[in-house]
Each structure stands twice: as structure tokens, then as C-alpha cells.
Image (spheres, rainbow, N blue to C red):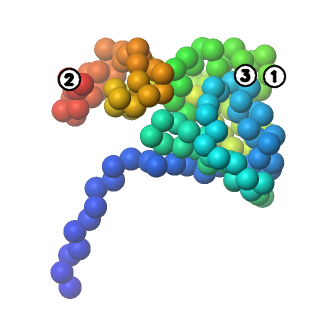
Amino acid sequence: MAERKKSQVVGFNHVALEVGDIDEALAFYGEFLDFELRSKSDKMAFIDLGDQFLALSKGRRQGPDDDRHLGLVVKDKAAVAAILEGMGVAIISDRFLDFLDPWGNRIEIIGYHNIQFTKAPHILRGMGLGGLDKSESALKELADKGMAPD
């Protein structure tokens, strides 16, 4: 049998998190994230992340996540940390800004400045984030892969 040609992965379109209640989830995430709601029903909500989105789906039944997590990239990680502290949300990692949402989804907050992940300039502009930059270490990681910005 001939070997089939594989398709290269380009990225993520969306991630879906299961929550107990859509309105409660939007209120919880809205406490520390500034986002645009794409659409909402009784069972689903879609939060815009520029050219990607986060789906919230009603109906979580499993226990809390251990290592499985969603890494959300933010403009200001320190601001999120301060808000989470004020909300009384327990940080569950000594190394990262990881916490469990009220339904047991493990979330890691990551600052845009220090990681390889890069939104295209036109997407950042459209999100009102045209001035975001990358650290030297993040730029080096990208350059080492031949992906340095122009």
C-alpha cells in the first residue's frame, strides 16, 4: 500500500472547555480577561481571540484536571495574577500562573512578550494590540527556527 501524504499542522482554530454554566463561566473569565463575545446560547459561548476563539461548552462531568491544561496568552500576565489573587483564586503551580477554574479546567496564563507564539501584525492591530513586542529570548527562539519577524 502506498504511503499517504501527511498534512502539516498549521495551528489551532479553537479550544473548547466544558463548564457547568455558560453565564457563570463568562462572568468568571470576564473578571480577569478583556474579551469580545462572538456568540452565546444556553449550551455554548464563543470568545474571540483575534483569529482564534475559545469555546465554552455546558456540561462538564469529569473531575479537576491534573496536568492537562490550556495555556492562555495575555498582554499583561502580572495584571491577571493580581486580579486572580483579589478573586481568591488559588495558584496551583510554584513555577507558572496555573489555576483551576470553578469547573476544574486547569488554566495557565502566559505573557505574550516572552514566548514564541506570535500573532501577525494585522491581527494584533485588529485586536487593538499593535504595540506588543517580544523579548530577546523569544526573538532568538523564532530566529533559530527561521521564523524571525521582518
Q: Position of residue 86 (x, y in %)?
A: 78, 16
Q: Secondary structure at mark 3?
A: helix
Foreground pick, 46 / 76:
46
Discs 1/2, front: 2
Q: Secondary structure at mark 1?
A: loop
Q: Pointer 1 and pointer 2: residues touching (CB < 8 Å)?
A: no
Mark 3 vs mark 2, CA separation in Å? 36 Å
Residue at the spot of label 3: 84
Mark 1 vs mark 2, CA separation in Å? 42 Å
Q: Position of residue 136 (x, y in %)?
A: 31, 14
Foreground pick, 120 / 99:
120
Please indicate, yes or no, whether residue 46 appears anywhere in the rendered image.
Answer: yes
Amino acid beneath label 3:
Leu
Q: In the drawing, does residue 85 fall left or right of residue 120? A: right
For the residue carrying disc 3, how many other residues have a C-alpha within 10 Å: few (<14), some (14-19), or many (20+)?
Answer: some
For the residue carrying disc 1, how many other residues have a C-alpha within 10 Å: few (<14), some (14-19), or many (20+)?
Answer: few
Residue at the spot of label 2: 150
Discs 3/2, front: 2
**Closer to the N terminus: mark 1 or mark 2?**
1
Foreground pick, 84 / 122:
122
Amino acid beneath label 2:
Asp
| Numbered badge on residue 88 | 1
Q: Position of residue 112 (x, y in %)?
A: 45, 23
* Res 121 quadrant in image: top left
Q: Secondary structure at mark 2?
A: loop
Amino acid beneath label 1:
Gly
**Closer to the N terminus: mark 3 or mark 2?**
3
Mark 1 vs mark 3, CA separation in Å? 6 Å
Q: Position of residue 96 (x, y in %)?
A: 58, 26
| Residue 84 against residue 14 in the figure, above or below | above
